[in-house]
Every structure is written in structure tokens, then in C-alpha cells.
Image (spheres, grey):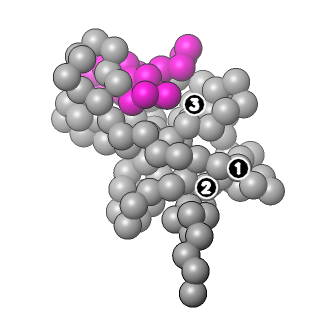
Amino acid sequence: MEVKMADKFVKIANFSELQEGRGLQRVVNEHEVGLFCEDGKVFAINGECPHVGGPLGEGFVEDGKVYCPLHGWPFDLKTGKCLTNPRSKVECFTTKVEDGEVFVCVSE
Ligand code: FES
């Protein structure tokens, strides 16, 4: 049986759960994922801060960045780069929205 790329996408939320300026922290395939919506676009990044593991999906969101709720490190939602510590970066995951549902592509 043919395996399609879409088969790797896993539902993570309903689009109606997302709010501008606020993230969601979810677990997908045993990965912590931070999910965000800004200007109508959906972003997903590794939800575990590389500093000491703060839940990035619970951070404050502004101007394309999420601030870790524990110590405030800012991460770019598009690139995953930490903007104050160039050696730190979190993985970004591909997202798609279909029929009001949000899917994220996370390895198993
Ligand atoms: S745990 Fe995220 S900045 Fe410290």
C-alpha cells in the first residue's frame, strides 16, 4: 500500500482552539509541541525549551516570537531560533489546516 506524505500528519487541535497571542502545549507521538497562531498562520515548534525544559506552548506570544514562561528566552516561531542565545534552537514542525482541524507533521 502506498504511503502518502499526508499520512505523517497527526491532528493536534481544532483551529477554533487557537488564539492570537496565546499558545497551546500538546503531546504528539511523545513529542512536546508548542502550537501558535499569528496573523492567521499556524506554527508548531518543539514545546520543550532547550534551557531547562519550560513549556513553550504556555509562553507569551508577540511579533512572531514566543517567550518561554520560565525565564523569558524568546524563540522565533518560523525558524525556532532563540533570539538571545544564538546557540539555542528548537525544531519546527510543518502544519496544515483542513476542515477546521490542525495537523502537525511530527516523526514517530
Ligand atoms: S526554561 Fe526556558 S528560558 Fe529557562
Of the residues shown, which amino acid type is indicated by label 1?
Val
User: Which residue does the numbered mark 2 point to in the structure image?
Assistant: 103
**Residue at image point 43% right, 28% down:** 79
Q: Is residue 40 above or below residue 25?
A: above
Determine whether 20 is above or below 12 in the image: above
Amino acid of disc 2:
Phe
Label 2 secondary element: strand
Query: Would you place residue 14 above or below residue 36 in this image?
Result: below
Considering the image in quadrants, where does the N terminus appear? bottom right
Which amino acid type corresponds to the residue marked 3 in the rendered image?
A: Arg
Residue 19: percent from the left, percent from the top?
A: 67, 34
70 left or right of 36 in image: left
What quarter of the picture does the C terminus occupy? bottom left
Q: Is residue 60 visible?
A: no
Disc nearer the start of the sequence (1/2): 1
**Magenta region, residue range:** 62-80
Q: Main secondary structure of the magenta part?
A: loop
Mark carried by residue 97: 1
Q: Say which of marks 2 and 3 sits in front.
A: 2
